[in-house]
């Protein structure tokens, strides 16, 4: 597979070097020439040393929605964060400062983290999903969505932001330290309804009731059931509803601007801003450092977190599920047998029951009654099937690039969960 030269692309996405030009001379800040177009950016003669370029005053900084990139080099918070994350020297402080600017603080996409966050969100979803599916190829889809949420969901990314020592600014502005996370916070008690900028207090329903979420499902108007297949096809990485999907934006481009304007006007929460920040850092690492740096960053900060997948299961009728599983795989029907017991006639008896398929023990459980031990044995048998993991776990992204790797070995593709 041919490797891509990402460093050539990064120049079209990153614009930290063009922003000081708009503050180098005393221009009218009401127009705020922050465009990356060469025709709009004021030109500075090459013979003027950087030390002689006039710096903006405190009043000029307050007129800006976010700090200028020239202040990134003098921020101790930003340098400490760069060193704390062990980021490469390829990733400049100006880019890290841009990752800390939420679109609600600075609406200009050339100076906020929106483009980085989109790329980082796709990378986190791709790396997380392939790691889960290749490590546990038999997991049911609801458990996969729950594991995706646990690894890269908003609450997890918000906790990672706090662990990194990133603090939120009280109010965004040009005079704020570039090492602070800058966003315009939403009014307390006025939560976002469907991630499109509409707020609970602004809804038109009686008693502040939230209006129904918009959906691209063909059977939404017919009261169709929102099953796991619908969550997989139409929803996001975590199986949750979108306010507006990319299909809606493609059919009606004005919806994207309306939603963005609504979010800028109403503000955002600390959790949402922290989520976009971590995603933006992931995208910036990928653009500046490449695939290897992005995978190492993902392994160190996302996949290294301990997750007990066995506690995410919830079986309603495990004995019936186990019977259907044995019938599907061609095994003999499961039979529960008492392997040991103690205190049958006492106040606290203990029974140990094993579930067998022929001569093979599928699972074992214990409980204060025979039924309880039998149900726990069936649950353990089902978990033993679903939590199967190969010894040598490899993911498809390992084959990207031109470096020499071992030949690809196809991973197990299971036929799916048990359908009752």
Image (tube, rainbow, N blue to C red):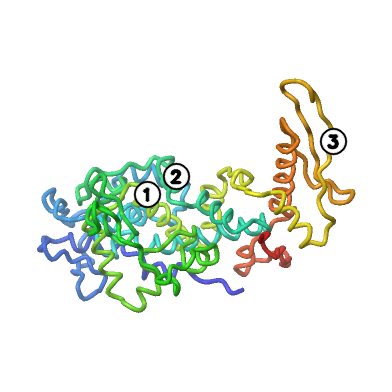
| Label 1 Cα crowd, 10 Å radius (few <14 / some 14-19 / many 20+) | many
Are circles 2 and 1 on residues that touch, CB within 8 Å?
yes
Q: What kind of element bears circle 3? A: strand
**Relative side of 159 to 112, left or right:** right
Q: What kind of element bears circle 1? A: helix
Sequence-first disc among 3 and 2: 2
Which residue is denoted by mark 3 in the rendering? Answer: 339
Quarter of the image that includes the N terminus? bottom right
Q: What kind of element bears circle 2? A: helix
Quote the CA–CA distance across marks 3 and 1.
52 Å
Which residue is denoted by mark 1 in the rendering? Answer: 274
Question: 47 or 22: which is nearer to us?
Answer: 22
Sequence-first disc among 3 and 1: 1
Q: Is residue 372 above or below residue 391?
A: above
- Where is residue 55 drawn, in percent x and y? 17, 53
| Res. 330 image quadrant | bottom right
Question: 269 or 189: which is nearer to us?
Answer: 189
Q: Is residue 150 above or below residue 338?
A: below
Which residue is denoted by mark 2 in the rendering? Answer: 160
Q: Residue at x 66, y 60 (%)?
A: 420
Q: Is residue 255 visible?
A: yes
Quote the CA–CA distance across marks 3 and 2.
46 Å
- Where is residue 96 drawn, in percent x and y? 37, 53
Are circles 3 and 2 on residues that touch, CB within 8 Å?
no
Residue reaching furthest bottom?
A: 251
**Relative side of 166 to 57, left or right:** right
- Where is residue 232 drawn, in percent x and y? 52, 65
Question: 45 or 386: which is nearer to us?
Answer: 386
**Relative side of 139 to 337, left or right:** left
Q: Is residue 67 visible?
A: no
């Amino acid at each position: 597979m041919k490797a891509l030269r990402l460093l050539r692309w990064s120049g079209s996405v990153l614009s930290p070097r063009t922003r000081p030009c708009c503050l180098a001379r005393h221009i009218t800040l009401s127009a705020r020439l922050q465009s990356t177009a060469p025709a709009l950016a004021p030109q500075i003669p090459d013979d003027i040393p950087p030390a002689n370029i006039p710096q903006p005053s405190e009043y000029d900084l307050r007129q800006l929605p976010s700090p200028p990139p020239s202040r990134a080099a003098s921020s101790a918070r930003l340098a400490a964060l760069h060193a704390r994350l062990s980021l490469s020297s390829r990733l400049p402080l100006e880019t890290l400062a841009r990752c800390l600017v939420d679109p609600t603080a600075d609406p200009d996409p050339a100076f906020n983290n929106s483009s980085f966050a989109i790329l980082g969100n796709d990378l986190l979803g791709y790396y997380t999903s392939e790691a889960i599916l290749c490590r546990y190829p038999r997991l049911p889809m609801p458990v996969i969505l729950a594991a995706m949420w646990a690894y890269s969901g908003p609450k997890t990314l918000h906790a990672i932001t706090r662990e990194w020592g990133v603090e939120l600014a009280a109010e965004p502005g040009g005079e704020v330290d570039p090492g602070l996370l800058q966003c315009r916070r939403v009014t307390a008690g006025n939560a976002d309804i469907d991630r499109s900028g509409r707020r609970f207090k602004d809804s038109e329903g009686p008693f502040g009731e939230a209006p129904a979420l918009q959906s691209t499902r063909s059977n939404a108007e017919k009261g169709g059931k929102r099953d796991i297949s619908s969550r997989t096809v139409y929803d996001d990485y975590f199986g949750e509803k979108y306010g507006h999907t990319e299909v809606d934006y493609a059919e009606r481009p004005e919806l994207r601007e309306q939603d963005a304007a609504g979010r800028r006007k109403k503000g955002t929460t600390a959790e949402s801003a922290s989520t976009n920040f971590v995603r933006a850092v992931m995208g910036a690492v990928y653009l500046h450092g490449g695939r290897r740096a992005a995978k190492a960053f993902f392994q160190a900060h996302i996949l290294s977190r301990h997750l007990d997948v066995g506690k995410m299961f919830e079986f309603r009728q495990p004995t019936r599920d186990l019977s259907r599983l044995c019938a599907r795989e061609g095994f003999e029907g499961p039979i529960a047998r008492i392997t040991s017991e103690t205190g049958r006639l006492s106040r606290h008896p203990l029974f140990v029951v094993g579930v067998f398929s022929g001569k093979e023990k599928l699972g074992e459980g214990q409980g204060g009654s025979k039924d309880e031990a039998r149900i726990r044995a069936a649950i353990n048998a089902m978990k033993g099937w679903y939590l199967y993991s190969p010894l040598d776990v490899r993911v498809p992204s390992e084959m990207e690039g031109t470096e020499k790797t071992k030949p690809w070995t196809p991973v197990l593709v299971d036929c799916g969960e048990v359908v009752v």
